[in-house]
Image (spheres, rainbow, N blue to C red):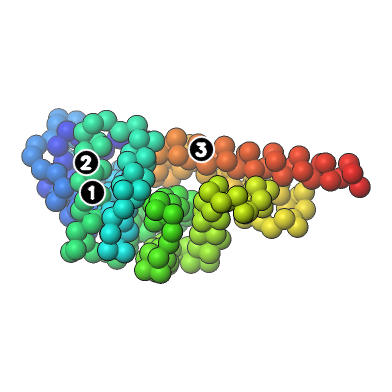
Amino acid sequence: MAWWGRALGGTMGFAFGGPIGAILGYVVGGFFDKGLKKNLEGGFSPNDRRQVAFYASTFSVLGYISKVDGYVSPHEIKFAEFVMERMSLSEEQREFAIKLFREGKKDNFELMPVLQQFAKECGNRRSVKRVFLEIQISGAMADGKLDDIEIDVLRTIADVLGLSREFPGILESITSGSAGSSSGEIKPLAEDYKLLGLTEGATREEVKRAYRRKMSQYHPDKLVAKGLPEEMMEIATEKTKQFRAAYDRIQKNLKARATVH
């Protein structure tokens, strides 16, 4: 992480500002190394600010959602640890993420100000916001179900991020995929279409356009350039692999059907 230092504490929180800066100030303290001191004295670059906001918001909001139904399940904790593992965090960075998660679980955690600042830092970078929302939905789904209060919180997140219209499709894609993998009730091909934001009646050209759009939205290098922390690249890369696999299966099926007819 370009903005990372050994000890961030109140100094980093003060430099960043806002409710996210306050969280950073709460969860760690002490000193900071020379590289971070120089960075703070010169201020954060816009991309640094977006990466800080994404990192701090991701884990603190995951903590909030895990507690919102009144009980933090082992599955929700494991999901947060899974995200940390996929980011290949150092021991120190992992400890920082855990503290952010715990901060989000506190009764006095204020969700709206954090979301509003995160949305402001992201600007019009909708793809970065979508990745954030998908992580939160997956975290809420970690225990295998979604309570009404969790859906309300997820809808609030989508509203603040300007993703209200996309929310139903994103939610269905993640929840149906989870249900299909566990129960086998949903056909894999139907899941593939949903993953690309399509129905099974889509034409070959519609499938191709949807695939290209998804690959463009979730291209790891583009997402990092827009503010996704570099440590999140593996998650974005995995997403593009899912799109590619879904596209290949759909195309294979369409070709087979065309041969038969």
Measure how far apart labels 3 and 1 are at the Cα level.
25 Å
Name the residue rendered at 12%, 47% in the picture.
10
**Callout 1 touching callout 2 (CB < 8 Å):** yes
* Upstream in sequence: badge 3 or badge 1: 1
As rendered, which of 223 and 76 lies closer to the eye? 76
Instruction: Tell me where residue 41 appears, x and y as whole percent.
Output: 17, 40
Q: Amino acid at mark 1?
A: Leu
Q: Tell me the residue that label 1 is attached to.
A: 100
Name the residue rendered at 17%, 33% in the picture.
6
As rendered, which of 36 and 184 lies closer to the eye? 184
**Callout 3 touching callout 1 (CB < 8 Å):** no
Instruction: Tell me where residue 179 appears, x and y as whole percent.
Output: 54, 53
As rendered, which of 213 and 151 lies closer to the eye? 151
Quick one: SS at disc 1? helix
Q: Tell me the residue that label 3 is attached to.
A: 238
Q: Tell me the residue that label 2 is attached to.
A: 96
Q: Farthest residue toward the right?
A: 261
Q: Amino acid at mark 3?
A: Glu
Q: Quadrant of residue 229?
A: top left
Instruction: Tell me where residue 238 appears, x and y as whole percent.
Output: 51, 37
Name the residue rendered at 34%, 32% in the picture.
88
- Looking at the image, is 235 positioned above or below residue 74? above
* Residue 132 visible (yes or no): no
Q: Quadrant of the N terminus?
A: top left
